[in-house]
Image (cartoon, rainbow, N blue to C red):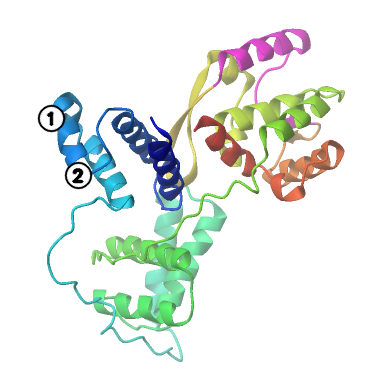
Amino acid sequence: MNEEKLKKFYGYIKHLYELRVTYEKAGRHIKHVKEFLESDCEPTKRGYLQYRKTHADIFHESLACDAILDFLSYVGQGWKRKGKKKESSTDSVQPLEKLTTMSEKNKELMGGFMNWLYENCDYSLHTMRIYRDSIKGFFEYSSEFSVDNARRYVKTLENSGRSATTIRMRIGCLERFGKFIKKPIELKKPKIQKTFDTENVPTEIEYKRLLEYLQTKNNLDYYFWLKVIASTGARVSEFLQFTWENVLEGEVTLKGKGNKYRRFFFSKKLQEEVREYVRLYGKSGIIATGRRGVITSRGLAQLMMDWRKKAGVDKSKMHPHAFRHFFAKMYL
């Protein structure tokens, strides 16, 4: 890959992470675009057609085609689509006026919905509050649940300056509520510009410095806690479920955020270290256990703030979720 292609390639990687795409999708796009740029074909429309002829075997996978066409569009070599630009459907939507009171009927509906969520969904208290506040907010502006009123409520949120993230979250709650009362709706969600900023992510040097500091402490558990979080990309709620046995087995599947199951893998090097540690100190069960039992997410965050003072790491980089981003950066 020559210097010009390399420059475009790095620019495209940055572009991908400014969009709201999953790490998996970004990784596959990067793979196919890299293979295209490493070929003798030029990054142009003609080069794409030539590449497609000589590499027909990979184009059975639609993502290869999508990835390369997306890259060409990014570098200004995409195909222009003909046709008139449609007017935004939200331009003619009128916002709602706030009601003086919420009807008893809607209060009962909201209560029934919350009870249903509690009984059927394993949601955290934080998520339950989001659902409650979202449905309550809607009924403070509308006396009847309908697609039209839902759209007008979204327009009201936009006019009040709510962020795209908040509006997407409220829409998700309304759609779930619609299914509950057998009046399913589907609303267009605003796009979110996702930035890929690594300034508040620990560097590899800072990570090694933290490990060196933790190795000097009497309690080596902390050393392994950090290694496990940084090498798996686990959320705090997921990390708090890990056991020493999971690490020794090399993998584990857990239910995490959004009631979804995720599979975690532990490197062979980490397994070797843990195996020796477990043998020497007789460790078993939940990894994140302190003197008073299993630690909380807040307790872990407080510990990390103490570690960063001793290891000289900026406090903006020392919270559990920062090491999830660290894992993603190192993985890429």
Relative horizontal placement of residue 203, taking residue 256 as reference (left or right): right
What's drawn in magenta, residue-wise?
266-290
**Residue 73 in view of the camera:** yes
Using the image, determine if residue 129 lies above or below residue 272: below
Pinpoint residue 55: horizontal percent, then vertical percent: 18, 26
User: Which quarter of the picture shows residue 190?
Assistant: bottom left
Mark 2 or mark 1, which has the lower sequence index? Answer: 2
Q: Residue at x 21, y 77 (%)?
A: 87
Using the image, determine if residue 236 lies above or below residue 180: above
Using the image, determine if residue 299 lies above or below residue 286: below
Relative horizontal placement of residue 36, taking residue 277 as reference (left or right): left
Pinpoint residue 264: horizontal percent, then vertical percent: 50, 27
Magenta-colored stretch includes residue 251? no
Tell me whether circle 2 and circle 1 mark residues in contact (CB < 8 Å): no
Within-10-Å neighbours for mark 2: few <14, some 14–19, many 20+: some
Measure the alpha-carbon separation of dots 2 and 1.
13 Å
Three-letter code, disc 2: Lys
Mark on residue 53?
A: 1
Q: Residue at x 31, y 87 (%)?
A: 94
Magenta-colored stretch includes residue 275? yes
User: Which quarter of the picture shows residue 297?
Assistant: top right
Determine the secondary structure under disc 1.
helix
Residue closest to the eye, 203 or 20 = 203
Determine the secondary structure under disc 2.
helix
Pinpoint residue 145: horizontal percent, then vertical percent: 30, 76
Within-10-Å neighbours for mark 1: few <14, some 14–19, many 20+: few
The residue carrying mark 2 is 45
**Residue 288 in view of the camera:** no
Q: Residue at x 67, y 32 (%)?
A: 204
**On-image quarter of the N terminus:** top left
Three-letter code, disc 1: Lys
Residue closest to the eye, 35 or 284 = 35
